[in-house]
Every structure is written in structure tokens, then in C-alpha cells.
Image (cartoon, grey):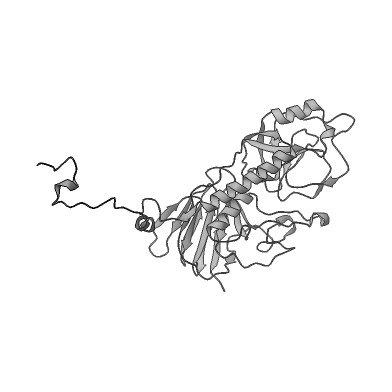
Amino acid sequence: MGAILKIISPGIVSSIQDQGRRGYAGFGVPRSGAADSVAMQIGNALVGNDPFVPAIEFRFLGPKVVAEKGRLRLGLAGNITAELTLAENGEKQSLSSWQTVNLNEGDVLSVSSLESGATGYLTVEGGIELTPILESYSTYARAKLGGVNGLPLQAGDKITAKLDASRDGMEKIVNLPPNLDVKKVRVMLGPQEDYFTESEIGKFSNEVYKVSPDVDRMGIRMEGVELLPRPEKGSDLISDGLVPGSIQIPGSGQPIILFVDCQTIGGYPKIATVITADLPVLGQLVPGDNIRFELVSLSQAQAALREQSLVIQTAIESISEYFGEGVMDLKALYQANLIGGVVDANKSGHFPGHLEGK
């Protein structure tokens, strides 16, 4: 049996997530999965895992955990701060985002509220021992699927790592982390843009919308200019398919952006759909954020996805060993050429312009 991580406090809401359940929407099963797939992939790379190995996702406020058994190495992904309390002497160490931390038995890690954004991750080196449900470990709490007992993490839950000790104990850091632009969300029109006049579509793409307090993994309600459908169309339609990123316009005229835990069908017209590359942006929106919807073409959406892959690759390639703030990197020091030459103090010519003739 591997090392054991115990949840002391789950924060506001923490859950186990991976890439999600793909291919089950036809059976009414939502996709679920990571709210910010970019952060998850980089966090897993920090600890040497494959991109979507199941991890602890937390929203708005991080968990407090303890290494109950063995030694674990965790990756901290997201714009977060954390504090490590050592079991040996009670010493507290401050930690920053985008780095690893080794927990010895009894060490306590406390993750505070996010400095910006809404979603962060704790990745576990080697992965965790869980039973997949419908080919995924992701938690979908409304149907009690996946994760630990099908629910968000609770105080007292224990997560068993596949490793009983970290592989090498070296700390790592991401030197070039991603920087998501949460001021705009790129969308493609449709599938029911014909329910709206060009004037209403212009309002949708030109006005600023504010994220309401009603935000979760199922959807994000926006506040702003009211969008009215064509009178002959109305605000209802025969229910059809939904995907994360669908933007519904209900009778209130206020957009609802559906997210990773969204239902699979719905009966409101969808004016537009968030492009795949900007779904992680949705995972970082917090109440009060102001955003604009930017209309893009299919080719632009495809280019954005390629650009996102490069951002992830750049961040992963920037991972290096980390020795802490103000600590000398001896390995780098030993690899550097610190000697520019050798002089002989007995030979004045070895000091041109200084000792000659003196």
C-alpha cells in the first residue's frame, strides 16, 4: 500500500478530477473533469505524471491535508499560496504556486485562498489509488459518480498514493507558468444564432458582462445587457444537446455559460459556444469579473488550440529543480565556469596596465 494523504479540511469545495467522461453524453452522463485543464496538465508534469492523472481540484479556497503515512511529493498548480508545517519541529514554511512540496509523515500542508482565479490543483506523484467509474475518476457529485464515494472531498477522507515514497525527493518549480487572460472569452456563434437579430448579436459581442455570484462547475450566470430573441422564435426550443461552453439565453435575457458538470440537453437557445482553448478561462472566473465575448472563426479557434498546446509545452519545458528562495543552487554552480583565467602575482605582465614598471 502506498503513502496516505488525509483531508483535514477540504476548503470550500475540493474533488478528484481527471480528463472527464467522454463519450457518455448520449446516455445523459455529463463530462465533468478538470475545470482548468491547462493547470492540471502542468501540475501533473511537476511530479512526473502523465497530463490527466487524477488530482485534487479545489475551488476558491484550498484544502488542509496531512501525510498520515509514508512520504509524498505533491505539485501545487494555480495562483495559490500555501504553508507547510513540519511534524518534526512545528516549523512553518511558506510556499508559492507552481512548485512541488515533499511531505514526510505527519507534515501538514495548508493551501490558502487563491490569489487570483478560482481553481487550483494538488497533484500526487505517481497518481492515486481509485476505482474508475465509466472510464474516469472524475467526481460528479449530483449522480455520486467517481472520486471518493462519489462526493466532494470531506474532512477525514483518506487518499492512497500509488507510491509509498517520492522517487527522488527533489523539489521542482515551473519557471514560465501560463498566464490566462480572463478579460475575454472567445466564442463561435451557434448553434441557434438565428434566434437573434444582428443587433442582438452585436450587443452580445460588444458589451461587457459581469460574472454573477451564481458560479459553480455546472454553469456561470452572467449579468449585463439583456438579449432578446426574435419574437417569432421565443426563448424556448425542443431540448437538444449541450456541451461545456454552450451559452444559453433563457427568458431573463442574461447569458448562462454552461461548464464541465453541465447537463447534456437543454431547451434554451444557444447564441454561441466557447472555443475549446478558452474553457480553462471559465475555470478561473470569479464573481465580479468583467469579460467580453469575442467572436472568432473556426480557423481562429483551431489556431488558439495550437497556441494553447505551445503554452503548456513551454511551461513544462521550463520546469527545473528548486532549492527555495535565497538558497544557492549548488548543482548549477558546479556546472558553471567560474574561472576566467589564471595569473601569476610574481609576473607583473600578468596584470597589464597595473604592475608594469612599478
Q: Nearer the viewer, residue 260 or 214?
A: 260
What is the residue that sits farthest to the top in this orientation? Answer: 199
> In the visual, does 26 lie left or right of 34?
right
Q: Is the C terminus in the top left, top right, bottom left or bottom right quadrant?
A: top left
> What is the number of callouts on the image?
0
The front one of 61 and 278 is 278
Residue furthest right as drawn: 232
**Residue located at (79% from left, 54% from top):** 25
User: Of 85 and 50, which appears nearest the observer?
Assistant: 50
Relative to 330, is 98 on the left or the right?
Answer: right
Does residue 139 appear left or right of residue 337 in this picture?
A: right
Quarter where residue 6 is shown: bottom right
Tell me what residue is drawn at x 77 percent, y 32 percent.
253
Q: Position of residue 213 (x, y in %)?
A: 65, 39
The quarter in which the N terminus is drawn is bottom right
Which residue extends farthest bottom? 1
Q: Is residue 243 above or below residue 183?
A: below
Task: Check the image and report above or below for 70 versus 216.
Answer: below
Q: Is residue 9 visible?
A: no
Picture residue at 72% right of the left edge, 36% below the top:
296
Residue at horizontal 63 percent and vertical 60 percent from the top: 54
Residue 63 in percent (x, y) is at 55, 55
Residue 283 in percent (x, y) is at 64, 46
